[in-house]
Image (tube, helix red, strand yellow):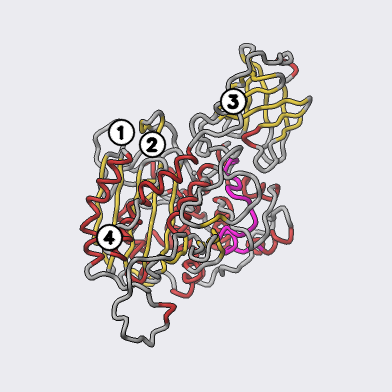
C-alpha cells in the first residue's frame, strides 16, 4: 500500500502500496463494505495503513450495478468465468481518454497538489501521456510526460515482472523457499523461516507483521541488517494472514537476485528496463538524483505543500525504490497487458507471470453477502469490478511526498498510470478509478475524491498517546540528568544513547546518527517529536525511564521498544 511504510501506512494504499507512527494508528476505514484481515494487534504505520485503505476503497465495493447486460435474449457458450457481466459501452475507452484532461484538472483543483503525470495504454500503444502542474512548488518548471517521479510501492508490481523473467529463465520458481537460496535467513518461527517462499513474501502472507522493518530503515540500517533482524519480530499465522510489509517483499526479491548472482537494481535493469527501452527508469536513488527532469517530494504542512524530506528508498528498492516517468511506465504496462510480450519480443512467459495477477491471499473480507472481498497476488491487488471485470492495481505512497497508482483492466486491454509529487491524499487513485468507471460504464459513478479523502485524512494525523494532551500543570520532578545518561541495549534497534547537552537529555538512535532532544513531561517520562517517512508532522513519542530500562513508545508497536542499560 509498503510502503516507506511504518505499519504501510501502505496498501500500503494497499495500495496505497502503498508510507504516522505505530503507536496509535487507527484501523483503516471501512470505506466500501470490506473489513481488513485481522493481524497482530500492533497498529499499522501511516504508510502501510494508507496503502491498505486505498486498496480497500478500490477493490471492495458492493456488487450491485445499475447497468444491465445487453443482448439478454442471446445465449453464449463461452466460459462465464472469462466473460464480463456488463459489456463496454461503445467507444468508452476513447471517451475516457478524452475526458482525462478534465478529470485531472478537477482533481488537482480540489486537492491543490503541485504536479501530476498520467499515461494510458490501449491496443498495444500509448494513447495518452501528459504532465500537469509543477515539479517543485518553489519554481515554475512544468511537469511533462518525461518528468521522473519516485513511484513508491508501484515498485512492487514492477518487481513481480522481474521475478517472472527469472521464473521464465528457470532460475527460480514462485514457490522456491527463500532459505533454500539464502541459508542464513530465518524468521521467529524457524519452520516458517525455512518454508516461506518467494511467493509468500511477494503476497504478504509470510506471517511478518505489517510494515516489518520499516522503522529500522528510518534509523539508517541497511538492507542486510534489516532482513537479518526480521527474525526477532512476532509472527502472524503463516499463509493465513495478509500483512503488508515492504521488507517482506524485499526478502523475496533479494533471494531472486542472490540466485542470479546480481544486485537487485542490476537484475531489474537487465531483465526489464533495458529490454523495454526504459531509459529513465531505475531502482537506484542515485540515478533519480541525477535526473535533471525530476519531480520533488511535497508534504502538506499547515495546509501548504512544502518540500521537507528526502526519501532514499534503496534499502527496500524492490518494494518502493523505483523512479520512472509515465512514458516509460506506459511501455511497461503495454508489456503487462501483452502477457509478457512487447513489440514482438517476449520478456517473460504468460505462465510465469499469471500467478502474480491471480489471487494468492485474501487481503480484505467482504462483511456482507453483497460485498466483494479483496485479494492480493504477487505485487498486485487483484479484484473484480461491479461490471464483472478483473481489475489489477497497486498504489504507492511516501509520507514525505509521493503518491502513485496503476490500474489495469485486461479484458478491456487498457491500463492507466498516475504519478504525483505530493503525499498521499488519494489523488492518483481518484483519477484512475474515475477513468475506469468511464471505460466500463460510460460515466463516473462514484465521488472518488471524497471517498479517498475521507478514508485517508485520519491516517495522516500525528500519533502518540500524548498528542493533543495538555502538559501537566504540576509534574513530578525528574531525577538528576546524570541518573539517565548512558547506553541502553536493544537486540532489534541496536543501542540507544542518552546524553546530556546544555543540561538537557538527548536521545541518539541508529547508524544514521539520529538525535532527538527529550522534553520533561512528568516524573521519569519525557517526550520527543519526530518527522520521518513513517511519522507525520506532529507525532509525539514518550520516553519512559524505569531504573536501567528505557521504553520508547514510538518504537514499541511490536513490544520491542524497551532498551536496557
Q: Which of the two discs, 2 and 4, sits closer to the camera? A: 4
Residues packed near mark 4 inside 10 Å, few (<14), some (14 to 19) or many (20 plus): some
Q: Mark 3: which secondary structure?
A: strand
For residue 308, side relative to residue 128 (left or right): right
Q: Are dots 2 and 1 in contact, CB under 8 Å?
A: yes
Asked if the residue at tag 3 contacts the one at tag 1, i.e. Cβ–Cβ closer than 8 Å, the answer is no
* Label 2, label 1: how far apart the Cα atoms are: 8 Å
Q: Which residue is mark 2?
A: 298
Image x and y of residue 300, in percent = 40, 34
Instruction: Determine the image quadrant of residue 81.
Output: bottom left
State the SS at label 1: loop
Query: Which callout, 2 or 1, points at the residue further toward the start of the chain?
Result: 1
Residue at 66% of width from left, 64% of height from top? 180
The residue where tag 3 is placed is 528
Instruction: Report the Cα–Cα distance between label 2 and label 4.
Output: 32 Å
Q: Which sits earlier in the primary sequence, circle 3 or circle 2? A: 2
The crowd level at tag 2 (other Cα within 10 Å; few <14, some 14-19, many 20+) is many
Q: Position of residue 278 (x, y in %)?
A: 34, 57
Disc 1 target residue: 137
C-alpha span from label 1 to label 3: 30 Å
How far is disc 3 from disc 2 in space, using C-alphas?
24 Å
Amino acid at each position: 500500500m509498503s510502503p516507506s511504510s511504518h505499519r504501510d501506512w501502505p496498501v500500503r494504499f494497499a495500495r496505497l502500496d502503498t508510507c504516522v507512527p505505530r503507536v496509535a494508528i487507527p484501523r483503516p476505514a471501512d470505506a466500501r463494505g470490506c473489513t481488513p484481515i485481522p493481524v497482530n494487534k500492533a497498529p499499522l504505520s501511516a504508510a502501510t495503513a494508507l496503502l491498505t485503505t486505498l486498496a480497500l476503497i478500490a477493490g471492495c465495493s458492493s456488487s450491485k450495478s445499475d447497468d444491465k447486460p445487453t443482448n439478454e435474449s442471446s445465449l453464449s457458450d463461452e466460459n462465464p468465468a472469462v466473460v464480463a457481466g456488463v459489456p463496454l459501452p461503445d467507444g468508452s475507452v476513447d471517451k475516457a481518454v478524452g475526458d482525462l484532461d478534465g478529470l485531472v484538472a478537477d482533481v488537482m483543483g480540489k486537492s491543490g497538489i503541485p504536479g501530476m503525470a498520467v499515461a494510458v495504454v490501449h491496443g498495444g500503444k500509448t494513447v495518452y501521456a501528459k504532465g500537469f502542474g509543477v515539479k517543485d512548488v518553489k519554481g515554475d518548471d512544468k511537469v511533462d510526460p518525461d518528468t521522473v517521479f519516485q513511484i513508491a510501492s508501484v515498485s512492487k508490481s514492477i518487481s513481480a515482472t522481474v521475478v517472472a523473467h527469472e521464473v521464465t529463465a528457470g532460475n527460480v520458481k514462485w514457490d522456491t523457499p527463500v532459505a533454500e537460496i539464502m541459508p542464513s535467513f530465518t524468521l521467529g518461527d524457524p519452520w516458517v523461516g525455512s518454508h516461506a517462499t518467494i511467493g509468500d513474501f511477494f503476497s504478504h502472507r509470510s506471517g511478518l507483521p505489517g510494515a516489518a522493518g520499516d522503522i529500522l530503515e528510518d534509523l539508517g540500517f541497511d538492507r542486510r541488517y534489516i532482513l537479518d533482524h526480521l527474525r526477532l519480530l512476532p509472527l502472524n499465522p503463516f499463509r493465513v494472514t495478509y500483512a503488508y510489509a515492504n521488507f517482506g517483499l524485499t526478502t523475496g526479491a533479494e533471494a531472486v537476485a542472490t540466485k542470479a548472482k546480481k544486485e537487485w537494481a542490476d537484475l531489474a535493469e537487465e531483465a526489464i528496463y533495458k529490454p523495454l527501452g526504459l531509459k529513465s527508469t531505475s531502482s537506484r536513488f542515485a540515478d533519480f538524483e541525477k535526473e535533471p527532469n525530476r519531480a520533488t517530494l511535497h508534504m502538506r504542512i499547515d495546509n501548504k505543500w512544502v518540500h521537507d524530506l528526502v526519501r532514499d528508498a534503496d534499502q527496500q528498492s524492490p518494494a518502493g525504490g523505483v523512479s520512472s516517468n509515465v512514458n516509460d511506465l506506459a511501455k511497461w504496462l503495454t508489456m503487462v497487458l501483452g502477457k509478457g510480450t512487447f513489440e514482438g519480443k517476449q520478456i517473460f512467459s504468460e505462465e510465469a507471470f499469471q500467478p502474480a495477477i491471480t489471487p494468492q491471499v485474501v487481503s480484505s473480507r467482504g462483511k456482507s453477502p453483497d460485498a466483494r472481498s479483496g485479494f492480493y497476488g504477487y505485487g498486485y491487488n487483484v479484484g473484480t469490478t461491479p461490471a464483472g471485470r478483473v481489475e489489477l492495481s497497486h498504489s504507492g505512497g511516501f509520507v514525505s511526498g509521493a503518491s502513485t497508482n496503476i490500474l489495469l483492466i485486461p479484458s478491456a486491454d487498457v491500463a492507466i498510470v498516475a504519478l504525483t509529487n505530493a503525499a498521499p491524499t488519494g489523488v492518483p487513485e481518484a483519477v484512475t478509478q474515475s477513468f475506469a468507471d468511464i471505460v466500463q460504464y460510460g460515466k463516473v459513478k462514484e465521488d472518488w475524491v471524497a471517498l479517498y479523502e475521507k478514508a485517508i485524512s485520519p491516517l495522516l494525523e500525528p500519533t502518540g498517546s500524548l498528542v493533543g494532551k495538555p502538559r501537566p500543570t504540576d509534574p513530578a520532578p525528574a531525577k538528576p540528568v546524570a541518573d539517565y545518561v548512558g547506553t541502553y541495549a536493544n537486540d532489534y534497534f541496536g543501542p540507544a544513547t542518552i546524553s546530556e547537552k546544555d543540561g538537557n537529555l538527548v536521545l541518539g538512535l541508529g547508524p544514521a546518527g539520529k538525535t532527538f532532544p527529550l522534553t520533561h513531561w512528568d516524573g521519569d517520562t519525557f517526550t520527543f517529536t519526530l518527522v520521518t517517512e513513517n511519522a507525520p508532522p506532529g507525532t509525539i513519542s514518550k520516553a519512559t525511564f524505569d531504573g536501567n530500562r528505557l521504553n520508547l513508545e514510538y518504537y514499541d508497536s511490536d513490544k520491542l521498544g524497551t532498551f536496557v542499560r
